[in-house]
Amino acid sequence: MKLYKLKYLIIILLIFSFFTFNAISKVSEATNISILMPAPFAKSTERLVEQFNKENKGKINLEVTQGPLETESVSDLAISSLLLGNSPFDILLMDVTWLPKYAEAGWLATLDQWIDPNMRDSLSYGASLGNSYKGELYRWPLVADMGLLYWRTDLMKRAPKTPEELLEISLELKNKGIVPYGYVWQGRQYEGLSCVFLEVLSGFKGEWLNNSNEINLANPESIKAASWLNELIQSGASPKSVTNFSETEALQAFESGEAAFMRNWPYAWAELQKEKSSVKDKVGITTMVSENGENSTATLGSWGFSILKSSDNKEAAFEAIKFLTSESAQKELFIHNGYTPTKEHIFEDKELIKNSPILPILKKALAIAKPRPETPLYAQISDVLQKQLSSILTDGKDVNEAMKLAEQKSRKIISSTGS
């Protein structure tokens, strides 16, 4: 009897020890949070991620999956994991154009419970755009971004104010043999071409998709915008090879001193100020020119964090987001990578302005930034536009015919879903 009681007592102690050990292990074991980021951002935030893990050792461990370089390839990877179910990611670093699609599909958790009014009010105007869908907040910006026009201060006294001026100066400098190229931009058939077109379209006072979800690609303004892009190539103001240019190729041409103008994002400024740059201290920036000589709209291209609804660790995920989007993190990303901050008061930082005089210019550009059409079907209608623009620029297709077809196909996509 005593032996039986002893065995029973040992069993109870073993069971108690097992559960106690597991409870202690669970308490001491850090919560793993996984973020999917495009390759450039994964590299840019390495030090910040290391710092976060050091400060939260034993509590939260942040792991970054480095996605492809191309924006849409990252989205494809994320969507594949979501469609298969049980996505390995807690957080996605999302392009501003993805949000409506992901939110409409029900893949994202709302952030309203963590973001108070003061946090919302801290954002600059441009950074506050593209984070909500149907009245709910699903994304918190890491960096702001907008299309910019870079110009050579050693070749001209001021930046051009109209499309005509930009074309004329480009041709003059090229024909005199001062530069091989006048104006370089993103003319390849990909998302960058849509961003370029939106800025030019805005300069001619046009609209791609209005508030009533009506496509306007065959109207006079859109025809003017597409015709002007085509004229750049046909006149020689832009090289024919620009139809194969993405941001990288445009930057390489401008950085080497081969071009007078370039359309690119803010990150390019930091690259142009490096010692290897042939145009260091010879560059000015502005926003895209417009028909009436006033500053046009800059295409919004910001990136921000969203938490997946399927994540089991949403609180810990938001702690990571809060750290990566903090004021100190934004300053570091701006200083070392040229990424535009999102918080309004950072643009007034005297020390930053002293070292980076473009900060006030970025603030003005962000104030007039405009998002691309906010629809879950954006990827489809952008693809249609890119193909038709490319047919104009590379195949010599009639502008009116191509833009009419772009409008018809886009309208069909929008109407097929009842949007």
Image (spheres, rainbow, N blue to C red):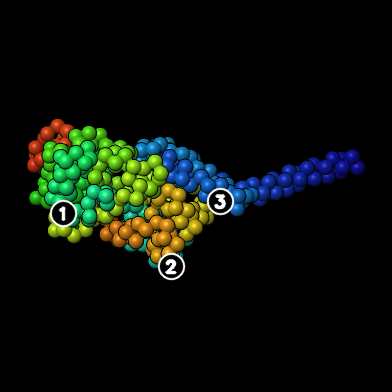
Q: CA distance from mark 1 to mark 3?
A: 47 Å
Residue ID for mark 2: 118
Q: Amino acid at mark 1?
A: Thr
Q: Earlier in the sequence, mark 2 or mark 1?
A: 2
Return the x and y of residue 209 as percentages of the image width and height.
Answer: 20, 51
Residue at left offset 34%, top offset 50%: 281
Specify few, some or many for label 2: CA neighbours under 10 Å numbering under 14, 14-19, or 20 or more: few
Return the x and y of residue 79 as percentages of the image width and height.
Answer: 38, 40
Q: Is residue 94 visible?
A: no
Element assignment for label 3: helix
Specify few, some or many for label 3: CA neighbours under 10 Å numbering under 14, 14-19, or 20 or more: some
Mark nearer the viewer, 1 or 3:
1
Q: Nearer the viewer, residue 96 or 188?
A: 188
Return the x and y of residue 388 as percentages of the image width and height.
Answer: 17, 38
Q: Are marks 2 and 1 in contact (CB under 8 Å)?
A: no
Residue 401 numbered tag: none
Q: CA distance from mark 2 to mark 1?
A: 39 Å
In the picture as drawn, the residue positioned furthest to the top comes out as: 395
Residue ID for mark 1: 162
Residue ID for mark 3: 52
Mark nearer the viewer, 3 or 2:
3
